[in-house]
Amino acid sequence: MGRAKVEMKLIENKQSRQVTFAKRRSGLMKKAYELSVLCDVEIGLIVFSGNGRLYEFSSGHSSLGKVIQRYKTHGNEEKSSDELENCHYGGLCIDVDLIKGVSNLKVEHLTVNELTHMEAQLDALLRQIRLRKKQLLMETVSTLSEKEKQLREEKQLLENKIAEMVGEQGKEVQPRERSRFGAYNQEGRRVGVHR
């Protein structure tokens, strides 16, 4: 008999939720440690609890700040505009969790170092958001300019067609003359005589 599959939804009971958080957090930290030792990799892990407490882990040979700095440096070197377009929210998919964590955060429980660290993270996130917003606005302006150009060309084409049609009808109407006594057809016979 296997383990029952856990339904992925918020645990309603607050005490059960706290117990589950503590167990899974320690399991996650253990896995991160094992991965760093077995594979000789740098790992940085940040977790905010429901009441805003910060838990962090970094592999033994580097601090979390160094791991984050390396991530920022490495990310800036490799990111291109194509990657930004292909990634959900322009590279901000991971940081959505940070925003959710910050919205539930109780800053009264944080130290000066934790607040400084969080401020730096939020500043970096804000710069990314502004860059993505600027990129999207420029793309929108470019698209609208192209559309405007296309509509102007279509308008000019339609105006030319209307001018041609009016010109052709004008040629048909010109041979007919109208006097105060009536109109004459092309054979010179009077049409619609007024008596």
Image (cartoon, rainbow, N blue to C red):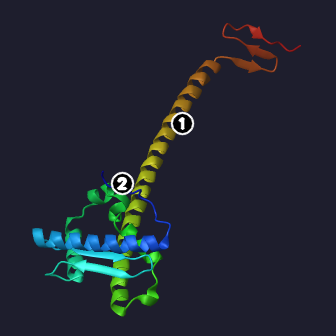
The three-letter code of the residue at mark 1 reads Glu
- Which dot, 2 or 1, sits closer to the camera? 2
Q: Is residue 8 visible?
A: yes
Residue 51 in percent (x, y) is at: 45, 79
Q: Is residue 101 above or below residue 145?
A: below
Q: What kind of residue is marked 2?
A: Ala
Please provide percent x and percent y for residue 18: 42, 74
Check disc 1 and report its element: helix, strand or loop.
helix
In the displayed image of the protein, which residue is found farthest to the front? 1
Rendered image: mark on residue 159:
1
- Looking at marks 2 and 1 on the same chain, the residue that comes earlier in the sequence is marked by 2
Q: Which residue is mark 2?
A: 4
Foreground: 157 or 3? 3
> Dot 1, crowdedness within 10 Å: few (<14), some or many (≥20)?
few
What separation in Å lies between label 2 and label 1 (alpha carbons)? 71 Å
The residue drawn where x is 46% and y is 64% is 10
